Image (cartoon, rainbow, N blue to C red):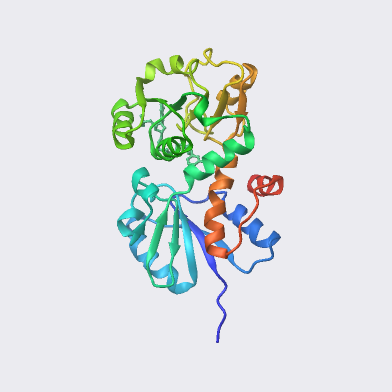
Amino acid sequence: MTIRIPLAGVIGSPIGHSKSPQIHKHWLKTMGLPGDYVPMEVELSDLRQVLETLPKAGFVGVNVTIPHKEAVLEIADLITDRATLIGAANTLIFRKDGKIHADNTDGYGFIENLKAGAPHWTPAAGPAAVLGAGGAARAVVASLADAGVPEIFLTNRTRVRAEKLAEDFGMRITVVDWVQAGNILEDSNLVVNTTSLGMIGKQEMRVPLDGLRAGTTVTDLVYAPLRTHLLAEAEAAGCVTVDGLGMLLHQAVPAFERWFGKRPEVDSATRAAALR
Ligand code: NAP
């Protein structure tokens, strides 16, 4: 009888930038578990065939990143309610019965990162301002609604995308024009950047930030660089700031546990492994 070492990985295109291999390999090693985690560059035209083949080669699941997060929902056999609501999956589990199970753990990672980095933030204490309405924003809004945030001010360069998100979620979401983005900061208990603005190689965030108040919790999903312009300005204004790397680390926890059978810890060594 051959004993198969469980394999997992991340599929996307491009994939070279992914920090997920460092994170999962660090946990496998420090927890002394058999297994491996590999990055795989996969084109959209090959997606279905790759997902049908990987379980036969000993894979127990994969993470999914840009541009396949939406397309995998067409292929999965079972989809969690939250992945359906978000319209995207970041985690696939290849079940023993041959079925592919799709989930989205980005919202979980987002909330756990906030709990760890801003323990005094209370969801019910006031509204949240969310900048952006892409795939990540949908996961963030779903998790904020679950956590009990009473109201969300949502702004996006492309307004119709924000309106569609508000319509899909059906909670108290007020859509605000992108040119008015600076005006929603003052009345918010939490400010979240879910756009790619401020990321290395992308445009800088130009939203006026003088409305940020001391004590407000401010977080950025962008983690390259770790200290974005938004976080630097927020810190200068006396806000509590939380960087985006922790979200990436925490979203990996439920996937690792399902694939390899033990729940890992997010600690300073995990952060260091991701930054290596
Ligand atoms: P996406 O679906 O492509 O959405 C991109 C968002 O950025 C949209 O709201 C888009 O607005 C906005 N945007 C892009 N360029 C802009 C510009 N020049 N001016 C104003 N807005 C602009 O991408 P995503 O999957 O949501 O990811 C968004 C960011 O979150 C990325 O930087 C990603 O790396 C990060 N992220 C981090 C984590 C983590 O674990 N920390 C997890 C997921 C994502 P339009 O709708 O107008 O195009």
- Determine the residue located farthest toward the bottom in the rendered image: 1
* Of the pair 114 and 26, the residue shown nearer to us: 114
* Of the pair 141 and 70, the residue shown nearer to us: 141
Location of residue 230 with respect to 28 vertically, above or below: above
- Determine the residue located farthest toward the top in the rendered image: 210
Residue located at (29% from left, 33% from top) = 167
* Of the pair 141 and 11, the residue shown nearer to us: 141
**Percent x, y for residue 274?**
63, 47
252 relative to 74 in the view: left or right: right
Is any atom of residue 224 visible in this view? no
Residue located at (59% from left, 46% from top) = 249
**Percent x, y for residue 28?**
64, 61
Where the N terminus falls, by quadrant?
bottom right
Residue located at (54% from left, 16% from top) = 212
Location of residue 24 with respect to 199 vertically, above or below: below
Location of residue 27 with respect to 237 vertically, above or below: below
Quarter-wise, where is residue 53 in the image? Answer: bottom left
Residue located at (51% from left, 60% from top) = 9
Quarter-wise, where is residue 181 in the image? Answer: top left
Is any atom of residue 166 visible in this view? yes
Location of residue 148 with respect to 14 vertically, above or below: above
Count the labels in the image: 0
Ligand 1, by image quadrant, is top left
**Percent x, y for residue 227?**
62, 30
**Percent x, y for residue 178?**
38, 20
226 relative to 101 in the view: left or right: right
